[in-house]
Image (spheres, rainbow, N blue to C red):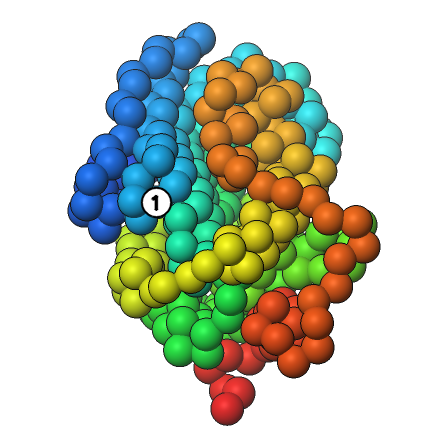
């Protein structure tokens, strides 16, 4: 008889991943450090919020670990599997956001997660993995885009045929501000309800994605964090951060899940930018770097094949 998958090894991996990312981002900033908290949650779970603010390089970052133990899945987790409503569950996740200070350095997001429903083994949705990472530039650079997507492809090597184009397209389809018909950024990889190959294979792929985040992002941050900028670039960055806030509050399933499951709201909303603005009916002037963001970088593109 099939055994219910164990949550423990993946939870241990997530804790180690959180620690390594926190240390790397502190080193990249050079001055600011993360506030570290350990918060026990109902049912024997654990939350480890890690939030950095007001650094010379990183204006805000949050790297959150959660191990949730619940009596019933919230609606955001059962809308695709209604037969599991009311069942207990365990979930483990690391979710992060980095908002650099320099407008030439892109915002980034990463999340990897696992759900296991109590007592369920072979039912649809009994367990699954999800996650990915994506990049949201304010000023686009082809070198950054190609490095980012090549690392996305490397994260999936050896875990199945044709995974990168599938998960890239999934990311392009998910990270869209549908009310504006606009991509959030230049994409990356994304997957959800992932069970392909069985539990061990799905876990291995998910951990590979998590372990490739720092190689994907740190070289870009290092290249851009000291570039000179002025008021114009800062104004555009804050305007585009407003789009980021719109996506997280209106569309993102992770935010909805966090609110519906009763998680600590400070942790759920830690992904929001520290400052942002909105302008009525704004359109950048043709031929400007700001216009190029929309024309070249907020459009799904084959960055590994395009010249």
Q: Residues within 10 Å of mark 1 (few under 14, many from 20)?
A: many
> Which x, y percent locates residue 29?
25, 46
Return the x and y of residue 251 as percentages of the image width and height. Answer: 69, 41
Residue 198 horizontal/vertical position (percent): 44, 50
Compared across the picture, whether 160 is left or right of 260 comes to left
Residue sticking out furthest to the front: 231
**Residue at image coords 30%, 61%:** 226
The answer to whether residue 173 is above or below residue 13 is below
Name the residue at 65% across, 80% down: 287
Q: Is residue 199 visible?
A: no
- The quarter of the rendered structure image containing the N terminus is top left
**Residue 180: image location, x then y, percent:** 78, 54
**In the displayed structure, would residue 69 be above or below residue 245?**
above
174 or 219, which lies in front? 219
x 49%, y 35%: residue: 274
Of helix, strand and loop, which one carries label 1?
Answer: strand
Residue topped by disc 1: 58
Residue 54 lies left or right of residue 17; in this view the side is right
For residue 303, say whether it is visible. yes
């Amino acid at each position: 008889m099939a055994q219910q998958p164990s949550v423990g090894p993946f939870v241990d991996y997530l804790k180690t991943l959180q620690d390594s990312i926190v240390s790397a981002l502190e080193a990249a900033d050079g001055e600011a450090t993360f506030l570290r908290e350990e918060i026990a949650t109902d049912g024997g779970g654990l939350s480890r919020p890690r939030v950095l603010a007001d650094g010379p390089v990183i204006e805000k970052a949050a790297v959150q670990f959660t191990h949730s133990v619940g009596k019933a899945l919230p609606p955001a987790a059962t809308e695709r599997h209604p037969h599991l409503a009311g069942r207990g569950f365990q979930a483990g996740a690391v979710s992060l956001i980095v908002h650099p200070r320099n407008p030439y350095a892109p915002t980034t997001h990463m999340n990897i997660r696992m759900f296991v429903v109590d007592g369920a083994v072979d039912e649809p949705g009994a367990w699954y993995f999800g996650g990915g990472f994506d990049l949201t530039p304010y000023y686009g650079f082809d070198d950054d885009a190609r490095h980012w997507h090549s690392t996305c492809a490397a994260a999936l090597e050896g875990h199945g045929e044709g995974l990168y184009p599938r998960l890239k397209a999934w990311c392009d389809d998910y990270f869209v501000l549908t009310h504006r018909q606009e991509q959030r950024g230049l994409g990356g990889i994304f997957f959800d309800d992932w069970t392909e190959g069985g539990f061990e294979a799905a876990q291995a792929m998910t951990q590979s994605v998590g372990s490739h985040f720092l190689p994907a992002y740190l070289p870009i941050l290092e290249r851009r964090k000291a570039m000179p900028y002025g008021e114009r670039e800062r104004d555009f960055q804050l305007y585009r951060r407003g789009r980021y806030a719109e996506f997280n509050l209106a569309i993102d399933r992770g935010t909805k899940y966090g609110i519906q499951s009763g998680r600590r709201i400070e942790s759920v909303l830690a992904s929001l930018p520290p400052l942002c603005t909105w302008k009525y009916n704004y359109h950048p002037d043709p031929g400007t770097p700001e216009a190029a963001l929309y024309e070249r970088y907020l459009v799904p593109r084959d960055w590994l094949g395009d010249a």
